[in-house]
Amino acid sequence: MKRLSLVLALLISGIFAAGSALAAGSFDIDVTADVINACSVTGAGTINFGDLNPMSPADQNDVPLTGDLAIRCTQGATVNLTAVGGTSRTLASDPSGSIAYTLNLPASLTGDGTTAISLAGITADLSGVAYANQPAGEYSDTVTVNLNF
């Protein structure tokens, strides 16, 4: 009987030991994330050449963008700006006046992730000759600028 008890005790301890060995171990979990290049655009901007006097036409160069336009991009994102329709533009009036001007866009901008990108490089140039023989009126153009990154 003692022998049977000893055999059973050894068998039972062997089963638990084998069960413990099967339950022990480790594994790896790969955890990943991708931060994408992204930008947000808020507000609006204006380039205003002001009142143009055709009796004393003068060139208007590097007229800056003003307003509350803000572009924020992922840190390190390089952003290229392109104007739909190009940068050689026309201000138009109703019914038939037109004034040629050039929109200047920086070659690229770089985001820092938190603050708005400086838009100081967005300007426009207008030659006095372009409006010297135009009728009085309000002239305007709407430019769609795409951000490519």
Image: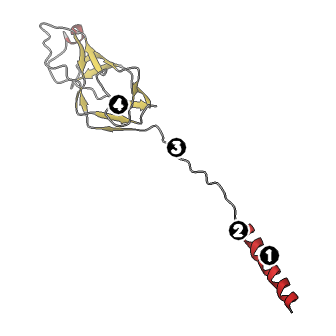
Q: Which residue is mark 2?
A: 23
Q: Are marks 1 and 3 in contact (CB under 8 Å)?
A: no
Mark before the other along the chain sequence, 4 or 1: 1
Q: Secondary structure at mark 4?
A: loop
Going by the numbered disc 3, the residue's amino acid type is: Asp
Residue 28 at x, y percent in the picture: 64, 54
Which is more toward the observer, 105 or 48?
105
Q: Secondary structure at mark 3?
A: loop
Which mark's residue is nearer the viewer, 4 or 2?
Answer: 2
Q: Quadrant of the N terminus?
A: bottom right
- Could you say which quadrant of the image residue 88 lies in? top left
Going by the numbered disc 4, the residue's amino acid type is: Thr
Residue 98 visible in this rendered orientation of the protein: no
Which mark's residue is nearer the viewer, 4 or 1?
Answer: 1
* Vertical side of 84 occupied by 13: above or below: below
How many residues crowd mark 2 within 10 Å: few (<14), some (14–19), many (20+)? few
54 sits to left or right of 2: left
Q: Which residue is mark 1?
A: 14
Tell me the CA gap for discs 2 and 1.
14 Å
Q: Which mark is residue 34?
A: 3
Residue at 34 percent across and 37 percent down: it is 114
Q: Are marks 3 and 4 in contact (CB under 8 Å)?
A: no
Q: Are marks 3 and 2 in contact (CB under 8 Å)?
A: no
Tell me the CA gap for discs 4 and 1.
77 Å
Q: Which residue is mark 4?
A: 144
Q: Are marks 4 and 2 in contact (CB under 8 Å)?
A: no
How does the figure colour the protein chain or chains?
secondary structure
Mark before the other along the chain sequence, 2 or 1: 1
Residue 29 at x, y percent in the picture: 61, 54
Going by the numbered disc 1, the residue's amino acid type is: Gly
